[in-house]
């Protein structure tokens, strides 16, 4: 080997050691950075000019595509179950649990108890007032719960709009990154950092909408949803959605009053079972807005209708005139079965018996249609009102089946189903969380190992020292030759 060859070998070794130390430094400093993949230096022997040496061919970005895809799907599933579980938990909070005094079931039990107490002393004004207050609390609990459900639908609509906006932005960024990565590769540059950035964006997209990553030429990628929709393949898709300011009862995609999704102007399904973009947080918000919340509204409307009809009967209160509202009303008016949608949000106590609205609490004893005070010792109407709560009736609507329920049983059935749904959703969330944690840990295990990187750094230092020693030896030889 010539002196020139020895110098070339040593200099190339020093350069390779310098690049290698940069790679180790990058690995250690980004060990916990989301989207960062461990790098290693790709080296090969160089025979340029017949001098030999080492050539740096580039960096290798270590990623397990299968594990990455599984983790992305797990992340989407976790986000979907997290959002639906949060809604069901909020719904249960709005209605309460049967063991809570302020729950819907507790309000009905309290109203029934107050009627029994008032019937035992119909001459006691405080007991009549307590019965009226219990009736008002019951109506307020139902209407407040209905308002809370509508607020959840409105929040879901806003969340959909925010996610669609971000999804469009992320897809445009991914399109730009595809171009940058392709250009960098064609020019022979290092695109590892660009791939890290792209991976973070793909992770963000896949949490909203689960996607499959398909490689394309020169490092580009395409994204397709599990439902077959193309989000990115050369050009980014444009997702369309029109938000509304307020989602009220009765609004739906089918009626055209709520917006669905479009991909490049084409409408796509948004249902939880066959949606083109199903499985992630975006689909969860559609499920809340269009399936879970409307079902809860319908069942709550059924409970409100049942309550109104129990007391809107002249057989219960003989003083009621034909077409007159009973103890509970539809925003002060008589209930019309053709206008059931949203009745729970309009439920109110009849002003005639409500002292807060200028009424007289004694009418709950004497009858809403009474024109003169009745016998203060008469308890028949109070007893009839209490009996009306215990009569078993077949619900006219809702998902309660064909069985007959009293007022308390109907409410308990609805609340029990919500509790079951919430429990099942929490179990699914727990499984999704465990799956995501396990896959994340596996991904981290294949990532940067600080101990291994430090060991590699020691070897790099030794290689650097050996090449430096070679240069020093050549220098000593040259000095010796010059002194001869």
Image: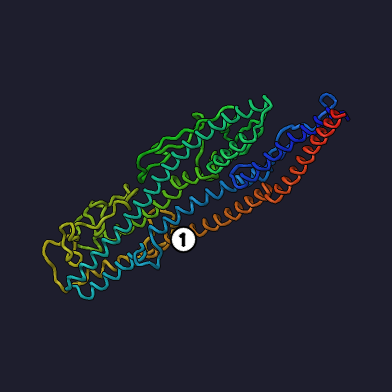
Residue sitting at 40 percent across and 66 percent down?
A: 98
Residue furthest out toward the bottom: 120
Residue sitting at 18 percent across and 56 percent down?
A: 357
Q: Quick check: can you spot residue 49?
A: yes
Vertical placement of residue 132 versus 123, above or below: above
Q: Is residue 161 left or right of residue 475?
A: left
Vertical placement of residue 150 versus 12, above or below: below
Vertical placement of residue 170 versus 368, above or below: above
Task: Determine whether the residue tagged by mark 1 lies in a helix, strand or loop.
Answer: helix
Which quadrant, please, contains the N terminus? top right
Of residues 177 and 239, which is closer to you in this image?
A: 177
Of residues 384 and 64, which is closer to you in this image?
A: 64
Of residues 328 and 268, which is closer to you in this image?
A: 268
Q: Is residue 387 left or right of residue 299?
A: left
Counting from the top left corner in percent of width and height, residue 339 is at 31, 47
Q: Quick check: can you spot residue 44?
A: no
Counting from the top left corner in percent of width and height, residue 292 is at 45, 50
Counting from the top left corner in percent of width and height, residue 9 is at 81, 32
Residue furthest out toward the left: 372
Classify residue 376 by image quadrant.
bottom left
Residue sitting at 20 percent across and 68 percent down?
A: 128
Residue hosting label 1: 419
């Amino acid at each position: 080997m010539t002196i020139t060859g020895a110098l070339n070998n040593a200099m190339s070794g020093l350069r390779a050691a310098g690049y290698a130390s940069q790679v180790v430094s990058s690995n250690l400093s980004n060990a916990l950075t989301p989207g960062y993949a461990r790098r290693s230096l790709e080296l090969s022997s160089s025979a340029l000019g017949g001098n030999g040496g080492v050539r740096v061919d580039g960096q290798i970005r270590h990623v397990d595509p299968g594990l990455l895809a599984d983790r992305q799907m797990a992340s989407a599933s976790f986000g979907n179950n997290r959002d639906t579980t949060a809604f069901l938990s909020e719904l249960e909070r709005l209605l309460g649990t049967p063991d809570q005094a302020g729950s819907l079931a507790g309000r009905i039990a309290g109203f029934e108890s107050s009627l029994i107490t008032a019937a035992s002393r119909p001459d006691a004004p405080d007991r009549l007032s307590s019965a009226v207050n219990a009736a008002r609390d019951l109506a307020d609990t139902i209407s407040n719960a209905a308002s809370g459900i509508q607020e959840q639908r409105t929040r879901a609509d806003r969340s959909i709009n925010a996610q669609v906006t971000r999804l469009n932005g992320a897809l445009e960024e991914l399109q730009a990154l595809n171009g940058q990565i392709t250009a960098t590769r064609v020019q022979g540059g290092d695109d590892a950092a660009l791939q890290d950035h792209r991976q973070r964006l793909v992770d963000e997209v896949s949490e909203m909408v689960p996607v499959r990553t398909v490689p394309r030429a020169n490092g580009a990628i395409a994204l397709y949803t599990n439902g077959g929709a193309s989000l990115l393949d050369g050009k980014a898709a444009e997702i369309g959605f029109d938000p509304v300011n307020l989602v009220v009862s009765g609004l739906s995609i089918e009626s055209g009053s709520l917006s669905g999704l479009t991909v490049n102007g084409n409408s796509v399904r948004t249902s939880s079972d066959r949606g083109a973009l199903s499985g992630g947080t975006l689909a969860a918000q559609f499920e809340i807005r269009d399936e879970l919340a409307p079902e809860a509204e319908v069942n709550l409307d059924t409970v409100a209708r049942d309550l109104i009809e129990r007391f809107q009967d002249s057989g219960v209160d003989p003083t009621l005139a034909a077409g007159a509202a009973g103890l509970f009303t539809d925003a002060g008016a008589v209930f019309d079965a053709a206008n059931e949608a949203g009745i729970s949000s309009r439920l109110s106590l009849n002003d005639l018996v409500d002292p807060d609205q200028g009424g007289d609490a004694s009418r709950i004893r004497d009858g809403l249609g009474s024109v003169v005070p009745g016998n203060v010792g008469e308890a028949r109407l109070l007893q009839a009102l209490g009996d009306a709560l215990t009569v078993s009736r077949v619900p006219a609507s809702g998902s309660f089946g064909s069985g007959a329920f009293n007022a308390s049983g109907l409410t308990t059935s609805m609340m029990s189903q919500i509790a079951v749904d919430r429990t099942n959703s929490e179990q699914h969330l727990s499984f999704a969380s465990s799956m995501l944690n396990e896959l994340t840990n596996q991904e981290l295990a294949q990532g940067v190992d600080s101990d291994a990187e430090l060991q590699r750094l020691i070897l790099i230092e030794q290689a650097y020292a050996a090449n430096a020693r070679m240069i020093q030896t050549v220098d000593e030889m040259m000095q010796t030759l010059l002194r001869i």
